[in-house]
Image (cartoon, grey):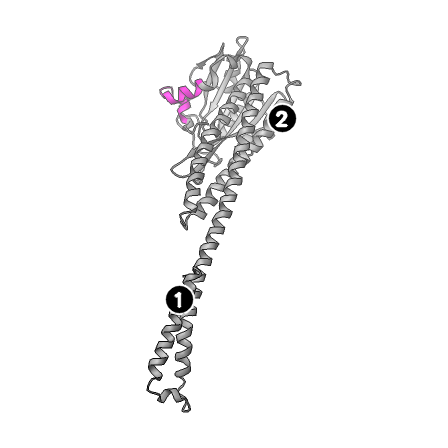
Amino acid sequence: MAIGRSRSRGHRSAAPTERDGAEGACLVRVVEGGDADCAPAGTTPGEALELAARGDGRMAVLLYPDTTSTAVQELADAWDLHPVLVEDLEHGGQRPKLERYGDVLFLVVRSAHYDDAREQVDLAEFHVLVRPGAVAILCQDGLWFDGTPASALVDPDSAAGERAVAALLEGELTQLGPEAVAYRLVDRIVDGYVPVLQGVAVDKDEIEKQVFSADPAVAERIYRLSQEVIDLQHATSWLIDVLASLRGGFVKHQVPEELQTYLQDVADHLDRVSARIAEYREALAQILNVNATLVAQRQNEDMKKISGWAAILFAPTLIAAIYGMNFDAMPELHWSFGYPLAVVTMVGFSVALYFVFKAKKWM
């Protein structure tokens, strides 16, 4: 696994949308009674608020598959957003956080999708605005939380896009108001962490086997997977703080009890995910240590063999060096058995040392 990841890369050209010629891609749905219906093509953020105000229990949901400056400014003008909030919306690459500007709740969350072929975790950033009667979801990276291109959300002929919208907006929970949509989005994102962890677990098991096969490339693979796990841990740890802040405002903002229970369940799920991520990070650190130990052992074995052969070659080299000095007063040079004896001695020493090192498992 590795990172060509979708980290908030800034604003790009908007994908084709129902609003021909508009720079900001926006799909507006009106949710009532647990059902989500498309608003007329070209509905503006201001008109979406008007649609939501036409009946009790109605709300408008605006989905921006690709955030642009024009789309953000149009939303800011219609919703009278705080300038600081507008600046945040125009810049991606933010950590998960929760902020309130008057009656507008600003939520930043990150989803994760695992690309097993590249061994990479792709993180996608979402900016969520919640206000009475309306929710706006801005996809900073052009991806939906399941890895599907967010442009499918604005394509009425896309079955995948319709399923994605229905999974988020339809059902009894959305009858509890805009907060329910934000909570469900967080729930889907947390659910998406599970298959990512499954992919990480598979690669971790493969790496454990690879470590003991003496593959020199395994160290790089461990480092890369560790970085992916660290990035995922950052996303989840910050999201834990976000959920804690949401739960802390239950009483002040009069959140329905059913939504409180729902968010508590999401928080419990996230805690389990976070614990597993911490386990994988620790496991990878241990695997890296084991790999370093095995590499050191293999190097030590190699040094033993090198030292053994150096010692074996040292004995004949020493004898040859002595009798190669050609001094006149060297009686063995004129002895008939001098040469055979020197050769036998060199071979004898070499053979003896070989068996000694062999017995000590240095060879």
Examine the rendered structure and indicate whether residue 279 appears above or below residue 309: above
For the C terminus, the image quarter is bottom left
Q: At which x and y percent is residue 317?
A: 40, 76
Which comes sooner in the sequence, label 1 or label 2? 2
The magenta stretch spans residue 155? yes
Q: Residue at x 57, y 14 (%)?
A: 258
Examine the rendered structure and indicate whether residue 363 appears above or below residue 221: below
Q: At which x and y percent is residue 342?
A: 37, 80
Label 1, on which residue? 354
Q: Residue at x 41, y 40 (%)?
A: 206
Q: Nearer the viewer, mark 1 or mark 2?
A: 1
Residue type at numbered disc 1:
Tyr
Side of 363 relative to 82 (left or right): left
The foreground one among 361 and 273 is 361
For the N terminus, the image quarter is top left
The foreground one among 70 and 6 is 6
Q: At which x and y percent is residue 315?
A: 42, 74
The foreground one among 27 and 112 is 112
Residue stretch in magenta:
151-166
The foreground one among 258 and 217 is 217
Residue 256 appears in the figure: no
- Tally the numbered discs: 2
Find residue 245 and name its label.
2
